[in-house]
């Protein structure tokens, strides 16, 4: 029973139309599911992913009318997006300049070429050269050429003021393996510890920046709500039982229709999710037309008229 990698990451936007333009037109990702927050149906839940809506490729957003995030610790601080090759990163530098995207320069971090940038609301992201490892599923209708597209998520970086208890949960509860550390990207003299899941590699790593002197973050637009880790469908009950046996407070089983979830907070308050790979986003729409209309899970379908009336067009 093992986590196999990053499943998805869910962030917050206060401007769904602008968010949609940036992630589909500038970054060239595919909108694979246009639905609502199942706990707050007044808000969109938008899922951007690769051409086949693969688990581990989806970056998602809740659309909430909130102020900007106040950066700090006790938070998910940076989202990695994988691309392949030095030439690809050079191409993205030029694209970001053309589209006036806030970005840095290509640097080597943790042994990988990395290009930091921000979305229009200030979410901190990085393009990571993964060397082309593993499968890629480009979206043919993307404005970005297939070989240059975002291949998937990872690694994800969190910031904590106290490392010991988080380390205990990551290693003893979730079975991650500490593999190395490196100087934290902000250059504040702290170290970031790398934890590997499954077969490891950038698609299956959580990076933990130990920043005891940083102020506490306040979640908002441009910030991240939670990170989800992948499990095979058949391991779901075992993970449910494991959290219960260890008396870790959790949501208990939650069926999101597109996958099944478990939610809990690690000791520094960051929300973690464990999510199954299936059934997947094609459970209620043809693969070729994912994201083109509002999709609702069966238990919300009777409220479609009410829900659609409360949403603004993208």
Image (cartoon, rainbow, N blue to C red):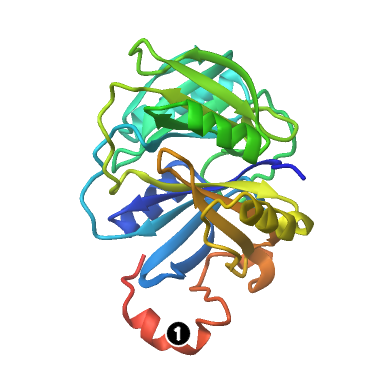
User: Is residue 91 something one can see in this rendering?
Assistant: yes
Which residue is depicted at the point 33% across and 53% down? 13
Number of numbered discs on residues:
1
Mark 1 burial class by Cα count in 10 Å: few <14, some 14-19, many 20+: few
Q: Nearest the camera: 116 or 173?
A: 173
Q: Nearer the viewer, residue 304 or 17?
A: 304
Let me know if residue 147 appears in the view: no
In the image, what residue occupies the spot 36% across and 10% down?
189
Residue 237 % position (x, y): 72, 60
**Quarter of the image holding residue 197?**
top right
Q: Is residue 309 left or right of residue 174?
A: left
Give the percent coordinates (x, y) of residue 261.
60, 59
Residue 19: where, in percent of width, then height? 36, 52
Q: Is residue 21 above or below residue 91?
A: below
Residue 287 x/y as whole percent = 67, 64
Which quadrant, please, contains the N terminus? top right
Residue at horizontal 50 percent and vertical 33 percent from the top: 166
Relative to 221, residue 257 above or below: below
Residue at numbered disc 1: 304
Q: Secondary structure at mark 1?
A: helix
- Front-most of 288 and 82? 82
Looking at the picture, tell me which residue is in the foreground, 239 or 165: 165
> Which quadrant does the C terminus fall into?
bottom left
Which image quadrant for residue 256?
bottom right
């Amino acid at each position: 029973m093992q986590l196999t990698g990053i499943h998805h990451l869910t962030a917050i936007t206060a401007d769904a139309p602008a968010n949609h333009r940036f992630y589909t037109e500038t970054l060239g990702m595919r909108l694979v599911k246009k639905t609502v927050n199942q706990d707050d149906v007044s808000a969109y839940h938008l899922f951007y992913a690769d051409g086949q809506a693969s688990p581990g490729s989806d970056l998602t957003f809740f659309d909430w009318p909130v102020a900007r995030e106040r950066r700090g610790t006790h938070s998910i601080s940076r989202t990695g997006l994988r691309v392949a090759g030095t030439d690809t990163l050079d191409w993205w530098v030029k694209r970001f300049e053309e589209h006036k995207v806030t970005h840095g320069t290509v640097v080597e971090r943790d042994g990988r070429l990395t290009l930091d940038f921000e979305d229009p609301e200030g979410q901190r992201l990085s393009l990571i050269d993964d060397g082309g490892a593993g499968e890629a599923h480009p979206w043919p209708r993307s404005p970005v050429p297939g070989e240059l597209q975002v291949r998937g998520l990872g690694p994800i970086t969190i910031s904590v003021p106290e490392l010991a208890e988080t380390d205990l949960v990551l290693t003893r509860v979730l079975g991650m393996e500490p593999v190395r550390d490196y100087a934290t990207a902000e250059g504040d003299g702290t170290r970031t510890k790398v934890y590997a899941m499954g077969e490891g590699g950038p698609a299956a790593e959580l990076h933990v920046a130990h920043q005891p002197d940083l102020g506490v973050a306040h979640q908002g637009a441009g910030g991240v709500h939670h990170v989800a880790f992948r499990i095979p469908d058949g391991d779901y009950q075992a993970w449910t039982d494991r959290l219960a046996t260890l008396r870790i407070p959790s949501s208990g089983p939650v069926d999101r229709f597109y996958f099944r979830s478990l939610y809990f907070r690690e000791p520094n308050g960051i929300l973690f999710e464990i999510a199954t790979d299936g059934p997947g986003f094609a459970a209620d729409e043809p693969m070729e037309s994912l994201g083109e209309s509002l999709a609702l899970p069966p238990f919300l379908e009777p409220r479609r008229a009410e829900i659609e009336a409360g949403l603004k067009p993208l």
